[in-house]
Image: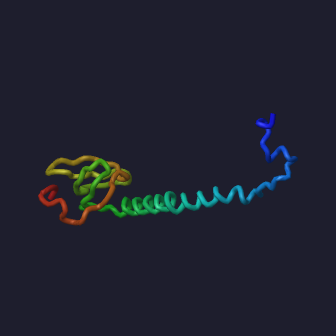
Amino acid sequence: MSFFISDAMADGGAAAQGGGFEALLPLIVLFIVFYFLLIRPQQKKVKDHKKLVEALSKGSEVVTYGGLAGKIRDMDENFVDLEIANNVIVKVERQNVSRELPKGTLKGTAE
């Protein structure tokens, strides 16, 4: 019946057991790796996007997460009016602006 009892436990518990810190060390190292590879870069990205959204102004050329590109014609606290072609204006939530384009990128549109 020795296959029910492991050999380490069969000798009366004389085998050395690891301490609590040694068991937690791999988890701590794993958390540190996740922090520097996943959490910290994501926090930086969110901070940069928030700064971009706050800095939007009329006349800025932007691209949304949906792929629409145009000039901002009007804006309020939550929405921007984006002119994507002559006399074609869509209302987009400010948080959906993904990036700002350099001036003159959208030549021939929304003058």
Q: Residue at x 16, y 56 (%)?
A: 110
The quarter in which the N terminus is drawn is: top right
Is 72 on the left or on the right of 42, as rendered? left
Residue 40 drawn at (x, y percent): 50, 62
> Which residue ends up furthest to the right in the rendered image?
12
Q: Nearer the viewer, residue 38 or 62?
A: 38
Tell me which corner region of the image, top left, top right, bottom left or bottom right, holds residue 58.
bottom left
> Which residue ends up furthest to the left in the rendered image?
108
Q: Residue at x 21, y 52 (%)?
A: 83
Residue 76 drawn at (x, y percent): 34, 54
Q: Nearer the viewer, residue 13 or 92?
A: 13
> Which residue ends up furthest to the top in the rendered image?
1
Is 40 on the left or on the right of 87, as rendered? right
Q: Residue at x 14, y 51 (%)?
A: 86
Is 74 on the left or on the right of 5, as rendered? left
Q: Nearer the viewer, residue 23 or 70?
A: 23
Q: Nearer the viewer, residue 88 or 27?
A: 27
Colouring used for the render: rainbow
Residue 75 drawn at (x, y percent): 31, 55
Residue 15 drawn at (x, y percent): 82, 53
> Which residue ends up furthest to the bottom in the rendered image?
103
Tell me which corner region of the image, top left, top right, bottom left or bottom right, holds residue 35.
bottom right
The count of marks equals 0
The quarter in which the C terminus is drawn is: bottom left
Q: Residue at x 18, y 59 (%)?
A: 106
